[in-house]
């Protein structure tokens, strides 16, 4: 306890200062005279029927609970006065002890630390009461126990009710005040440790307390603000002129104010904060203090309960995964690939849960989370205004994340450097020139139109299952002598009614497909027309998924199929970084920005519109053509890897999370609400971008044999680039892709880890693709197994 209220009994009433705790200020003392008596042992006293229930004390907005009051009676002998206080203790439900000597009193107090000590001062011959409580007593044990003397002197009155009233006054005065003071110490300790900036001012707006977090955020030294008036602290000019007046008007009426406020730091910088100011009402209903809690708006430590719950579910799922080594704790998709409605729903719910805790969080994502949290406690006009803010944020280019890679993973570093940057600028004159070639024209033997019905049987046989994800494009490549794009395009475009939509003859479409395929480089090991056919096939497969069909219009479907067909036309088999480092004409033409993607889109329209025989857009209405053209260009440019995470982030925040929230809120999806999310013009663009991006790099989600073949082809193309960079003296943008040292399994693991898993988790949550996620898991384990055996090749050596 370390402190107590004391009274002595005499022929007059004398008040003495209250005793403070050991670490508080030195106590005040008053002159009193007490007397000493004969020693006797301490006698604990407790009435038989005394209850020991907890007492509830209202302390401002809090309820505190304390044990029954403990009273120590120091009387040399029993008389009517001591009996009066014993009875009063019993009636007041206090615990009472009696001591007959100073030694017994100190021993008893040391053991129990009583709240109230009453010392008999009537007869000087018994003992010196002042000596018992004097702070400069020689015995060392007195100092930490009774350090302050008396609080009150009681005029001798043996009347039991008078004793009872005296005890009640002491309890509701000094004792309760000390109890609150002790509670305040705990409260201020919590404030000192709080991460939120807290400021307490008096009713006159004088700063009485700021916690360390406040001083740290605002840049002040410890204690520098204490005692200053609020008007002395610099104000930010970013606030509206009447904001302070509005705040003061609100809080002076005893009302709480909460809102956004710019505070000025000591160094002059302005900081935007979410501020909550609460008036504290004291005695008589008067405002005594103002408590301000300030949280900088970039604080991302808080999240709403639903997000916490979803993250908890995600953690539970991850703990149950048997393959935790696959990419940031992603789920083992074997547990979520049930084709039944219940299993599919549960698997998609898990995919939705993963979306809430994705690791590619951009700064704009944090802003949206803060706004969403603020909406929950905001009045309707504010919530509606924040809705408009969110709409604005979701239609602007603010979703680029801050990228970081593991220093110990050179494969990931090289993939990021090679695919997501524009290369290093060379300062020497040793430039490697890629000229902008004229587009290829159709050889005469290819111009003869093919009818869909005239496709040779062996080719038609290879395309029988083209609507299946397991379709083998390499069989078609062989059957068509490396012209799979024309034949697959004819069948898929026919299935989607593209000629009817474009109002063009089938012969024009066939000619267009042939000329586009002719402008792919068959000499490239990867970026050739077989890759274009593979992306076209994946695009058509995704367009058949229910959610995608709900979102897109026929013009979107046609745009997606055309964009997939032309997305890599005239690809030189080198990356953007290579072209920029080499100072190629294409890099100069497109200012080192999205060089290849810009070239693919521009050349596709140049080829198409140059010759009426292959101009599939010739009969379109002008406005519809411009809409279609813009959609195709946007999708081709979306395949550029520098904006990979931007596109994924935007898709997750604008589509997946709202859909997940709708599923969680009602249990059953509200069709109108879902439709409103899926069909806005902005979200349709996001769906199309995500669709072609996933189609473009879907190789790790193909059946294992197809995945292995594609891995070998892309590796060979990167090897060839590294060889040429060394020959030409150019910067080697992907050093790990050295054909003599490269580990293909490691490169595939890194690619899946960094680019594929998060993107396909998001796309699966939207489009429901359990078979792809199963292939992805199988393929990852295949590459992981090779890597664990220290193998660098595509396949293990023969047994």
Image: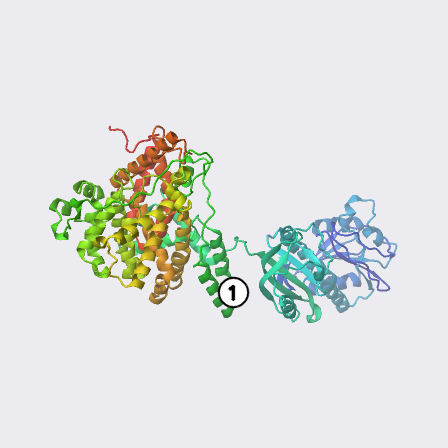
Q: Where is residue 617 in the image (x, y as percent from the top left)?
A: 26, 58
How many discs appear? 1
Q: Which of 413 and 625 is in front in this view?
A: 625
Which element carries disc 1, helix, strand or loop?
loop
Q: Position of residue 530 (x, y in %)?
A: 24, 43
Residue at point 86%, 64% (across, down): 12
Residue at point 46%, 59% (across, down): 393
When asked about the image quadrant of residue 88, the answer is: bottom right
284 to 199, vertically: above or below: below
Residue at point 38%, 60% (across, down): 682
Could you tell whether 490 is left or right of 550 in the image? Answer: left
Task: Answer whether residue 683 is visible to the viewer in this image.
Answer: yes
Q: Nearer the viewer, residue 615 or 143?
A: 615
Q: Name the residue under label 1.
A: 377
Q: Where is residue 77 in the image (x, y as percent from the top left)?
A: 80, 56
Could you tell whether 705 is left or right of 593 in the image? Answer: left
When asked about the image quadrant of residue 124, the answer is: bottom right
Q: Nearer the viewer, residue 86 or 705?
A: 705
Q: Position of residue 599 (x, y in %)?
A: 34, 47
What's the image's color scheme?
A: rainbow
Residue at point 87%, 55% (across, down): 35
Could you tell whether 571 is left or right of 373 in the image? Answer: left
421 to 132, vertically: above or below: above
């Amino acid at each position: 306890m370390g402190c107590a209220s004391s009274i002595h009994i005499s022929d007059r009433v004398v008040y003495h200062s209250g005793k403070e705790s050991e670490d508080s200020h030195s106590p005040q003392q008053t002159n009193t005279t007490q007397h000493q008596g004969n020693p006797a042992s301490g006698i604990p006293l407790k009435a038989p029927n005394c209850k020991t229930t907890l007492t509830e004390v209202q302390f401002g907005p809090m309820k505190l609970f304390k044990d029954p009051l403990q009273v120590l009676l120091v009387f040399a002998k029993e008389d009517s006065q001591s009996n009066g206080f014993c009875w009063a203790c019993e009636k007041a439900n206090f615990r009472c002890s009696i001591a007959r000597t100073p030694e017994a009193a100190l021993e008893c107090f040391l053991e129990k630390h009583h709240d109230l000590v009453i010392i008999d001062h009537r007869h000087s011959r018994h003992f010196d009461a002042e000596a018992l409580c004097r702070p400069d007593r020689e015995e060392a044990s007195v100092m930490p126990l009774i350090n302050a003397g008396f609080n009150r002197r009681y005029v001798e009155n043996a009347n039991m009710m008078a004793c009872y009233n005296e005890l009640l006054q002491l309890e509701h005065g000094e004792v309760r005040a000390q109890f609150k003071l002790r509670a305040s110490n705990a409260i201020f300790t919590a404030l000192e440790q709080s991460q939120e900036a807290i400021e307490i001012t008096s009713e006159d707006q004088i700063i009485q307390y700021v916690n360390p977090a406040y001083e740290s955020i605002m840049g002040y030294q410890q204690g520098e603000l204490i005692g200053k008036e609020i008007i002395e602290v610099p104000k930010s000019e970013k606030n509206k002129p009447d904001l302070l007046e509005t705040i003061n008007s609100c809080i002076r009426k005893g009302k709480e104010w909460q809102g956004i406020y710019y505070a000025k730091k000591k160094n002059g910088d302005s900081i935007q904060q979410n501020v909550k100011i609460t008036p504290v009402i004291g005695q008589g209903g008067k405002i005594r203090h103002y408590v301000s809690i300030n949280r900088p708006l970039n604080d991302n430590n808080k999240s709403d309960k639903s997000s916490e719950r979803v993250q908890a579910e995600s953690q539970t799922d991850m703990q149950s995964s048997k393959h935790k080594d696959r990419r940031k704790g992603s789920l083992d998709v074997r547990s979520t690939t049930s084709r039944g409605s219940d299993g599919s729903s549960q698997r998609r719910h898990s995919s939705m849960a993963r979306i809430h805790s994705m690791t590619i969080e951009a700064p704009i994502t944090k802003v949206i989370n803060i706004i969403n949290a603020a909406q929950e406690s905001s009045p309707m006009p504010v919530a509606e205004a924040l809705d408009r803010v969110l709409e604005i944020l979701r239609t602007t280019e603010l979703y680029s994340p801050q990228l970081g890679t593991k220093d110990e993973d050179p494969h990931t570093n090289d993939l990021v450097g090679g695919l997501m940057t524009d290369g290093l600028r060379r300062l020497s004159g040793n430039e490697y020139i890629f000229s902008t070639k004229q587009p290829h024209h159709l050889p005469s033997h290819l111009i003869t139109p093919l009818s869909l019905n005239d496709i040779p049987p062996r080719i038609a046989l290879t395309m029988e299952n083209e609507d299946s994800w397991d379709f083998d494009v390499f069989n078609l490549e062989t059957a068509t002598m490396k012209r799979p794009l024309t034949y697959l395009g004819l069948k898929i475009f026919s299935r989607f009614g593209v000629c009817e939509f474009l109002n063009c003859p089938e012969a024009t479409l066939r000619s267009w497909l042939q000329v586009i395929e002719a402008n792919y480089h068959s000499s490239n090991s990867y970026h050739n027309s077989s890759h274009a056919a593979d992306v076209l096939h994946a695009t058509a497969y995704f367009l058949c998924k229910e959610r995608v069909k709900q979102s897109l219009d026929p013009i979107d479907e046609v745009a997606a199929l055309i964009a997939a067909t032309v997305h890599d036309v005239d690809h030189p088999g080198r990356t953007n970084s290579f072209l920029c480092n080499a100072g190629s004409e294409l890099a100069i033409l497109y200012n080192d920005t999205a060089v290849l993607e810009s070239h693919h889109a521009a050349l596709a329209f140049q080829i198409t519109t140059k010759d009426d025989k292959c101009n599939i857009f010739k009969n379109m209405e002008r406005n519809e053509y411009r809409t279609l053209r813009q959609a195709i260009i946007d999708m081709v440019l979306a395949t550029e890897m520098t904006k990979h995470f931007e596109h994924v982030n935007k898709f997750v925040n604008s589509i997946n999370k709202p859909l997940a929230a709708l599923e969680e809120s009602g249990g059953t999806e509200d069709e109108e609400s879902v439709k409103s999310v899926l069909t806005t013009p902005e979200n349709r663009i996001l769906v199309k971008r995500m669709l072609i991006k996933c189609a473009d790099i879907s190789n790790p989600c193909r059946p294992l044999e197809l995945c292995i073949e594609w891995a070998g082809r892309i590796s060979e193309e990167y090897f060839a680039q590294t060889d040429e960079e060394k020959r030409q003296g150019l910067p080697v943008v992907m050093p790990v892709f050295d054909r003599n040292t490269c580990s293909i399994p490691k490169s595939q693991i890194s690619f899946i880890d960094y680019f594929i898993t998060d993107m396909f988790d998001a796309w699966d949550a939207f489009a429901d693709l359990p078979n792809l996620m199963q292939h992805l898991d199988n393929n990852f384990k295949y590459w992981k197994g090779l890597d664990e055996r220290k193998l660098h090749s595509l396949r293990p050596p023969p047994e």
